[in-house]
Image (tube, grey):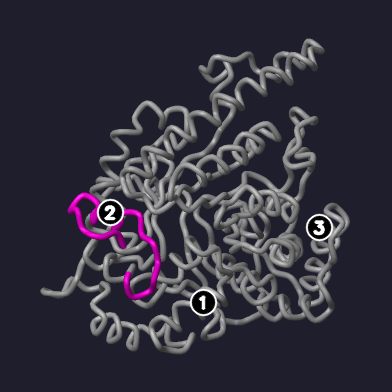
Amino acid sequence: MSFGMGGVRTAGDLIARAQMERRLKIREAKAYVAKKLGVDSVTLSDEYAMTELRKKLDIGLIMALTGYAKGLAAKTRISKTCDLKINSVTRLLEKAQLRGA
Amino acid sequence: MEIATRSGSGVLIKMTKDQIRAEIEAGSGDAAEKAHIPGLTSDEIDQILEILTERSKIVSVERGREIVLSRDGGVLKYTGCTRYAGSPLSKEQAISIGERIIGLDTMELGHADYSIKPCKAIAQDEAHHMENAQMVSIIPVLYGAMPNLGTYYRSLGGPWPAPTDLLKDGKVKESRETQENAAEDLQRDIIYVAKIMDQSGADGFNFDTTAAAGDAEFYATLKAIEEVKKETSLAVQVGMAGEMIMGMHCELDYKGTRLAGLWPHQQGVLVEKAGASMYGPVVNTKTTKSFPWNLGRAVTFIKAVTRTVQIPVHCNMGMGVCGVPMTEVTPVDAVTRAAKAMVEIADIDGI
């Protein structure tokens, strides 16, 4: 809590994905995600701003609000919004015989 | 005036500001001498001193310098393991708690034994948990296991004679051969489990406590990473077992670098070369020394890592590693101070 990004409370999951897929150091990973979301790097760890942005983009929230994308649906939207390859999403689309993410 | 700090074993102790500064400096000097790396500058020592002498119990990093929190052990820390929380939860529930209640940036699925060899036999069952978890999770979920070469020796129920038994009889050549045979089996098993996890939609594979059995284990893991990167879409995270690679074999090299005796910054270069996405260095805590001594030492080692390794560095910061006191229930004052120093001075990318 005192030094972590905060996962889906903020943009922590997105930055982790940028590090994992693109092997980016923390500053570069934040810059990459910030650019994709159209915000500055400090906003990425702001719970209020990121909750509103995550609602708007429908990329998954820390709350289980009815009607918003959850789980695999949220990851499918993250993959598209942030141009990040997500294994489970690719496999879902293959199984559903849809074009790969 | 005396300030509250900790011993390396976690006991609350008191020291003067001058004593704390001297301890940080001595710890840094020890790391610099052992690994032939630069020690901390006077300004950096002052910065750690300031962190250690802050009056509040919990400290934090500057806004905007938050880092990614990844996991080792993952669901094991929550579910039915007596050495951890032992809560009556399913693995899927534990992953959900990590994501939706604790706010982790990544989570990890793993078997209670947490070693590759026993994981192999139940890999399909583990894949089922991974598929379930992937359906409902948003954060990256990795599969985690220790390479644990020791489980391939007869002393732990494996097929190969234990190198330590052979060494006792002066059989150096045979000791090396048995490690090479075990390493080959380990490499094959890692790839088997990784391919199944890839099919189940896992986001990555976390090798935890790598090289616990020495250079042959590190060799097998590096070779397996190459193969995992070629054969699967998994990201690879590598957490180490200790600050120096033990020379159990002593003649193994990876891409021209001898593995025995490598320090964290040298280990990381090879992990990066093998194709991993994230590297988790370890610095062992000395329980007979103070927390300031251990932190000064750990920051010196990790600073050399982040200056050398180009992939994200997620240093291990649990009990007994990277400055954190060696105690089962880690004091939050020490953990947050160690983390702040690692972020602000060593410039880490995650924990």
Mark 2 packing: few (<14 Cα in 10 Å), some, or many (20+)? many
Q: Nearer the viewer, residue B219 or B207?
A: B219
Could you say which is closer to the camera, residue B18 or residue A97?
A97
10 Å crowding of disc 1: few (<14), some (14-19), many (20+): many
On the rendered image, what quadrant is the C terminus of chain B found in? bottom right
Discs 3, 1: same chain = yes
On residue B134, which mark appears?
2
**Between residues B125 and A59, which one lies in front from this camera angle?**
A59
The label nearer to you, 3 versus 1, is 1
> Is B222 situated left or right of B139 in this image?
right
Question: What residue lies at 74% left-to-right and 63% top-to-bottom?
Answer: B308
Q: Amino acid at mark 1?
A: Glu
The residue that disc 1 covers is B66
Residue B71, percent from left and from top = 46, 55
Q: Can you say whether B47 is above or below A89 in the image?
A: below
Report the chain holding disc 3. B
Please indicate whether residue A84 sits to the left or right of residue B48 in the image.
left
Q: Bounds of the magenta span?
A: A80-101
Label 3 secondary element: helix
The answer to whether residue B88 is above or below residue A92 is above
Of mark 1 and mark 2, the one earlier in the sequence is: 1
Q: Residue furthest top?
A: B169
The amino acid sitting under disc 3 is Ala
| Callout 2 secondary element | helix
